């Protein structure tokens, strides 16, 4: 095993993360976070939960495109997208175990149900959708060990899994926005809107597409895999449309709430809003409007990553920046909050890497070292269950 | 009928005996240092604040439509029929949605604990259920904090304002705020100066309605959206099947013709 720079970084992140984990469970939330009675939801809710779920949206977007709208060309990125979503949800649950004050009672959700609570809806969606993702992911494992029977069995329930997966994602992504509907007097009007659930769902679709571009480019670089440009171009086109729709929805909202003048007035919140809007809409839409960018892998990658940062800014604005005026002081996360999040993210990268290495996530002949007979590997080369599922 | 507390800040002398009685009742620590703390915390359910010669008490408002009870995923909060909003620590999973939601910022947290609880005034539910008044009302030497039926207290508050219009602002805080609360406040100065949220800011709509409008659609949304998704799935796959069958037929015809 070579000792590379990134491995060293990984080790440092894990050591610091484990230290913070120890402090979290040995001394309580107060010792590792800067959360207070006035700021009861901090960086872990803002990033690990809101952004984590958002970044996992690629799973349902690509599955929907392939199975509901029959976009066969996206089949080659479906497995990595499902893997990303599955890992995203698992890590989101890990994040939740840090953030909940009494994580050992998380199962109470199943017996003391309060159907009026958005948090209840969120919890149920997390549990059920993670289960669905697990089943959507399982064929990779069965295939790896050449287990034919269970593949057939999963094959049979696949239509149910797909419909259920998209339904639950719709509910879950939007309900994370609904969480804030009950805080009209606390959340800054730049971000509080009755349309929050729609914004959260709409941006999740855009993020799903951007994330798929990001993760396939990233893994192609890391694994020396041949990139399918046609797939990326297609995703890039869809991303541009999704960004436009999101931008128009946001504009509509500000227009109807008479906020257009206020959002251009310089203020603490306005700076963060400008940053968010520039990163999530202005820059990527401008970039993607050039055909040259839309046809270049690097251009697509750049536009996607910028928009991802934009939507991450949006979630942090909704969950943190938007409350600072109400609370009357700034909330800056403690370093231990960052280090736990970093550890969780690093675990995600590591697990993705391992899964790609040991499971048939990407078509085999696309790896370097093996004869790259087909530069643009035809989807026909995948004799996988996903290929035939539901046919 | 719902019970309530009427706090009249013009009668209050700032003796803080309510703080002490509350601590005793709820087995919270209390000493001179804690008495000097001018804010509520995990060990201080209620506080009497001083500003010059003016006093103001803060405590959980026990909303008629409590947001905390509506947002709690496990129903750890609920409003009893007598009025108090109570907390069941056993159910709590520690998501702190109640704290993020409460417009009065009443729920406090045991940040230093390994098995933290949410802490807030629970309006002595056992005493109230037994027909007694709350500990703070019982000990109050001047009657600044008065316990009774909510309707009676509202009438009394209105009378007091009518008889002494120069002493009071013409306003009963808690009468309509967020749909009404079981703590009513009379004052000669603006309660907002003591940290209470302004009426125009929080409005008179019960907080649960903001999410209710969305949540009540979920039961309809699930079957409709499943049917739509299932329908699209079926159509797109039926199309593919037909296309494949046609292609197959076409091929057979061709090969048949060649023979």
Image (cartoon, coloured by chain):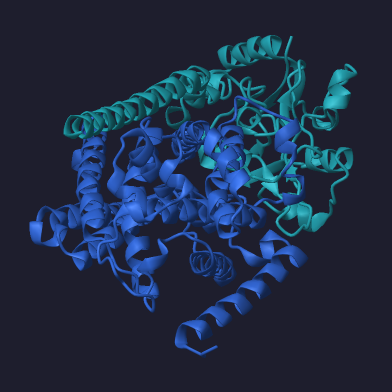
Q: Residue furthest toward the bottom?
A: A3
Q: Position of residue A83 (x, y in %)?
A: 49, 55
Q: Residue furthest toward the front?
A: B259
Height in image: B207 above or below A351?
above
Q: Position of residue B19 (x, y in %)?
A: 78, 42
On-image quarter of the N terminus of chain B:
top right
Residue at left offset 17%, top offset 52%:
A285
Q: Is residue B254 left or right of residue B67?
A: left
Residue at left offset 67%, top offset 50%:
A100
Q: Is residue A149 left or right of residue B178?
A: right
Q: Which chain is cyan?
A: B
Q: Nearer the viewer, residue B236 or B200?
A: B236
Q: Nearer the viewer, residue B213 or B241?
A: B241
Q: Nearer the viewer, residue A93 or A212?
A: A212
Q: Is residue A18 left or right of residue A330?
A: right
Q: Is residue A328 visible?
A: no
Q: Which chain is blue?
A: A
State how many labels appear: 0
Quadrant of the rendered image containing residue A354: bottom right
Q: Position of residue B198 (x, y in %)?
A: 47, 33
Q: Nearer the viewer, residue A58 or A280?
A: A58
Height in image: A318 above or below B240?
below
Quadrant of the rendered image containing residue A145: bottom right
Q: Residue furthest toward the left?
A: A291
Q: Is residue A256 visible?
A: yes
């Amino acid at each position: 095993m070579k000792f590379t720079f990134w491995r060293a970084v990984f080790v440092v992140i894990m050591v610091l993360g484990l230290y913070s984990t120890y402090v979290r469970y040995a001394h309580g939330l107060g010792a590792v976070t800067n959360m207070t009675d006035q700021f009861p939801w901090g960086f872990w809710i803002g990033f690990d939960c809101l952004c984590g779920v958002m970044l996992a949206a690629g799973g349902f977007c690509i599955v929907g495109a392939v199975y509901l709208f029959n976009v066969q060309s996206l089949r080659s990125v479906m497995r990595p997208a499902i893997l990303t979503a599955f890992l995203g949800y698992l890590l989101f649950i890990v994040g939740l175990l840090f953030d909940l004050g009494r994580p050992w009672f998380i199962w109470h959700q199943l017996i003391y149900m309060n159907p009026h609570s958005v948090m209840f809806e969120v919890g149920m969606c997390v549990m059920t959708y993670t289960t669905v993702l697990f089943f959507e992911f399982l064929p990779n494992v069965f295939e790896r060990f050449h287990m034919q029977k269970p593949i057939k069995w999963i094959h049979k329930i696949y239509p149910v899994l797909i419909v259920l997966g998209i339904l639950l994602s719709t509910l879950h992504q939007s309900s994370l926005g609904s969480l804030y509907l009950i805080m009209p007097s606390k959340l800054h009007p730049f971000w509080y809107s009755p349309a929050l659930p729609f914004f959260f769902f709409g941006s999740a679709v855009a993020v799903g597409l951007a994330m798929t571009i990001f993760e396939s480019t990233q893994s192609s670089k890391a694994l020396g895999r041949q990139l399918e440009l046609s797939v990326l171009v297609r995703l890039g086109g869809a991303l541009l449309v999704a960004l436009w729709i999101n931008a128009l929805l946001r504009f509509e909202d500000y227009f109807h709430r008479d906020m257009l003048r206020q959002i251009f007035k310089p203020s603490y919140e306005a700076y963060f809003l400008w940053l968010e809007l520039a990163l999530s809409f202005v820059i990527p839409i401008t970039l993607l409007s050039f055909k040259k960018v839309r046809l270049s892998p690097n251009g697509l990658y750049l536009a996607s990553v910028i928009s991802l940062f934009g939507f991450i800014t949006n979630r942090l604005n909704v969950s943190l920046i938007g409350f600072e005026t109400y609370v009357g002081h700034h909330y800056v996360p403690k370093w231990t909050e960052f280090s736990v999040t970093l550890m969780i993210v690093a675990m995600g990268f590591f697990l993705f890497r391992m899964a790609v290495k040991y499971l048939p996530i990407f078509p085999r002949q696309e790896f370097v070292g093996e004869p790259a007979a087909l530069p643009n590997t035809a989807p026909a080369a995948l004799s996988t269950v996903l290929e035939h599922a539901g046919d | 009928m719902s019970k309530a507390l009427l706090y009249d800040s013009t009668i209050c002398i700032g003796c803080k005996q309510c703080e002490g009685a509350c601590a005793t009742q709820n087995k919270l620590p209390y000493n001179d240092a804690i008495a000097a703390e001018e804010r509520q915390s995990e060990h201080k359910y209620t506080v009497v604040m001083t500003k010059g010669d003016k006093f103001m008490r803060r405590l959980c408002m026990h909303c008629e439509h409590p947001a905390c009870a509506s947002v709690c995923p496990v129903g750890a909060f609920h409003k009893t029929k007598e009025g108090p909003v109570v907390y069941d620590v056993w159910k709590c999973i520690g998501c702190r949605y109640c704290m993020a939601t409460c417009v009065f910022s009443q729920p406090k947290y045991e940040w230093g604990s390994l098995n933290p609880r949410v802490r807030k005034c629970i309006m002595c539910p056992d005493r109230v259920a037994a027909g007694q008044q709350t500990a703070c009302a019982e000990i109050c030497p001047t009657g600044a904090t008065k316990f009774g039926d909510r309707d009676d207290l509202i009438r009394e508050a209105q009378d007091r304002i009518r008889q002494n219009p120069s002493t009071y602002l013409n306003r009963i805080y808690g009468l309509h705020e967020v749909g009404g609360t079981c703590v009513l406040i009379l004052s000669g100065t603006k309660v907002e100066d003591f940290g209470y949220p302004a009426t125009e800011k929080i409005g008179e709509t019960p907080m649960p309605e903001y999410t209710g409008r969305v949540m009540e659609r979920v039961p309809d949304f699930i079957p409709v959206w499943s049917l739509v998704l299932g329908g699209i799935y079926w159509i797109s796959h039926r199309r593919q099947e037909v296309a494949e069958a046609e292609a197959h037929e076409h091929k057979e015809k061709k090969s048949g013709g060649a023979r």
